Image: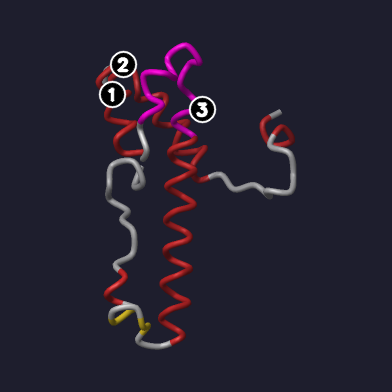
Amino acid sequence: MPYIDGIEINPIKNLYYKGEEPYSPKLAIKYIKKEFKFKRNSYKALNAIKFIILLNNINCFKNKINAKNLWKAIEKMYGKLNLKLINRYLNKIISFNYNFSTNINNYTN
C-alpha cells in the first residue's frame, strides 16, 4: 500500500529542475511522467478507499484529501484487524488498470 502508508512519494522536482528551468528536456519529461503517475495512483488509492466506505459513513470521511489520511481515519473507526480483508482487496483495486474509454461495469461484472 505504498500510496496509503507514504512509502511512495511525489518525485522531488529539484532533482530534475533548477528553479523553474529543467536541467534538460529529457529530465523535464521524466519528471512530468513520474509526477503524473504518482498523482494518478494516489487518486486511484484515494477513490478506491472512498468506494469501500458505506454511503452512510461517507460524511465522516469526505474532508480527507489524500489516501494516507483517509486510511488512518478508517483504521481509527474500524480497527486494524477488521481492515485486513479490505487491505487485500484494496491492493487489487489499486493495481488494477482499465481503459478509461470503457465502462467500469465491464470490468467489475
- Which residue is tagged 1? 75
Numbered label tally: 3
- Residue at image location 29% in from the left, 16% down from the top: 77
- Amino acid type indicated by mark 1: Glu
- Which residue is tagged 3? 51
Q: Going from the N terminus, do you reach mark 3 or mark 1 first? A: 3
Asked if the residues shown at circle 1 and circle 2 are in contact, with their CB atoms under 8 angstroms apart, the answer is: yes
Q: Residue 105 at what x, y percent from top left?
A: 71, 32
Q: Going from the N terminus, do you reach mark 2 or mark 3 first? A: 3
- Residue at image location 46% in from the left, 50% down from the top: 41
Q: Main secondary structure of the magenta part?
A: helix
Which class describes the residues within 10 Å of circle 3: few (<14), some (14-19), or many (20+)? Answer: few
Q: Residue 44 at what x, y percent from top left?
A: 49, 43
What color scheme is it?
secondary structure
- Amino acid type indicated by mark 3: Phe
Q: Determine the secondary structure under disc 2.
A: helix
Q: Residue 22 at what x, y percent from top left?
A: 37, 83
